[in-house]
Amino acid sequence: MRRDEQVRVIRRLMDHLDHQTNVDAGRIAQVPVSVYTDPERAELEWRRFFRNHPQVLGLSGDLPGPNSFFTSSDLGAPILCTRDKHGVFHAFLNVCRHRGVIIETADRGSRRTFTCPFHAWTYDTTGRLVAIPRQDHFGSVDCTDRGLVSLPAVEKHGFLWVNADREGRIDIDGLLGPELSDELDAWGLGDCIRTGEATFPHACNWKLANDTYGETYHFETLHRNTLANGFYGNVQTYDTYGVNHRMGLCMRRIDEMRSEPESAWRVLRGALPVYFLFPNIQLIMTGEGPILVRLYPEGVNPHQSRSEINWYVFPEDRRPAPTEGAREPLGSRMQAFAGIIQAEDYVAAASSHLGAVSGAQSHVVFGRNEPALHHYHSVFNAALGLPPIETFRT
Ligand code: FES
Ligand SMILES: [Fe+2]
């Protein structure tokens, strides 16, 4: 984040604290509860947002060196992501070109070649078919025609982007825009080192889990014994970048910055930036490194979803000095943060889902202090070609 932008975020948070205000959308919004429960809506989202849309499957640190790989089934197809011996990122359908068996079954690791468990056809990290056992008996096939099926794959700003549709497009510049591209680039996400992961299934629509990231209005109730110890609730900044956004959460230690000159301010000392990257990514920038949250529906089922959470640390020379940093071992605070999300936010999201299917009310309502929720649902509707969400001036 640019220096002037860091100062602006901290200054705005201090202003809100001083005047007991919060970010203000100027309007209340509402959406029908059916956006969370309707099977047709779920089917449309699955197709447009997950089956054929650029999707972040990880950060560069998920492929830490030449010949590293990971597999994914998050987008409804078996996908193999590799970094070849020259460091280039690739994504393939993880399907053997002989009789269609899944080739690589490990979650991640390092290999020069991938050998199918059925008859040992073997592919290299660029997807080329390099060995067919007993080809004299099998018969002649043109290996150049039988490589792994490539998917569009781009490594940019430290993210690994894939489109599960082999004819699909990835236009990262168009998706992020220049301002957000520059800002994400400046975090140096590509140098971050992967340290852990967790999968949290949730019995709710994926958007309800996503909604819990969209405001800090709930901090002093839902998180009163946890995050509220470190954060001021109902105080945040909010900026949109096309279909994406950035929230700035207000840490209580921002108070220590008031006695410091603005020239010494670093945003991560007093704020927690949380980026939403359309359609399903939450990127949380902690002082130790980023937490990447990927939210997925379970296919076309509107009632089940899950979060794939990966945490990463900045390289050693960019970690906070001991006086600013963690008293606990590196990374453990990030794991604790993810644990709170699971134990508190996703419990609330599952509860909202029960409320949605109960028939108690036709709509849920988003306040003036919840602009991110207005934004999520507005950009989802726009991308699906649906009418804008309803808003009311109050
Ligand atoms: S199905 Fe893969 S080698 Fe036969
Ligand atoms: Fe929360």
Image (cartoon, rainbow, N blue to C red):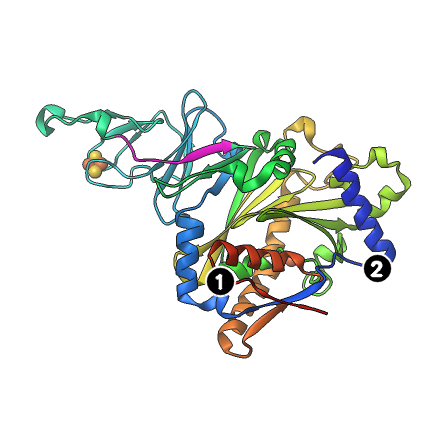
Toward which corner of the image does residue 151 lie, by quadrant?
Answer: top left
Q: Residue furthest bottom?
A: 360
Residue type at tag 1: Asn
Quadrant hosting ligand 1: top left
Image quadrant occupied by the C terminus: bottom right
Q: Is residue 226 above or below residue 61?
A: below
Q: Which mark is residue 344?
A: none
- The residue at 66%/28% (across/down) is 316
Percent of width and height locating residue 2: 72, 34
Q: Position of residue 210 (x, y in %)?
A: 56, 56
Which residues are drawn in magenta?
Answer: 147-155
Give, as a three-letter code, the residue at label 2.
Gln
Residue visible at 57% across and 56% down in the picture: 376
- Marking on residue 20: 2
Q: Is label 1 in a helix, a strand or a loop?
A: loop
Residue 238, horizontal then vertical, whole percent? 70, 51
The answer to the question of whether label 2 and label 1 lie on touching residues, with beta carbons closer than 8 A, is: no
- Tag 1 or tag 2, which sits nearer the N-term? 2
Outermost residue, right direction? 259
287 or 198, nearer to the observer: 287
Which numbered tag is attached to residue 205? 1
Total of numbered circles in the picture?
2
Foreground residue among 248 and 73:
248
In the image: residue 72, left or right of residue 276: left
- Where residue 373 sits, quadrant-wise, is bottom right
Percent position of residue 243, x then y: 57, 49
Dot 2: element: loop
- Whether residue 37 is in magenta: the answer is no
> Is residue 151 rendered magenta in the image?
yes
- Residue 312 visible to the viewer: no
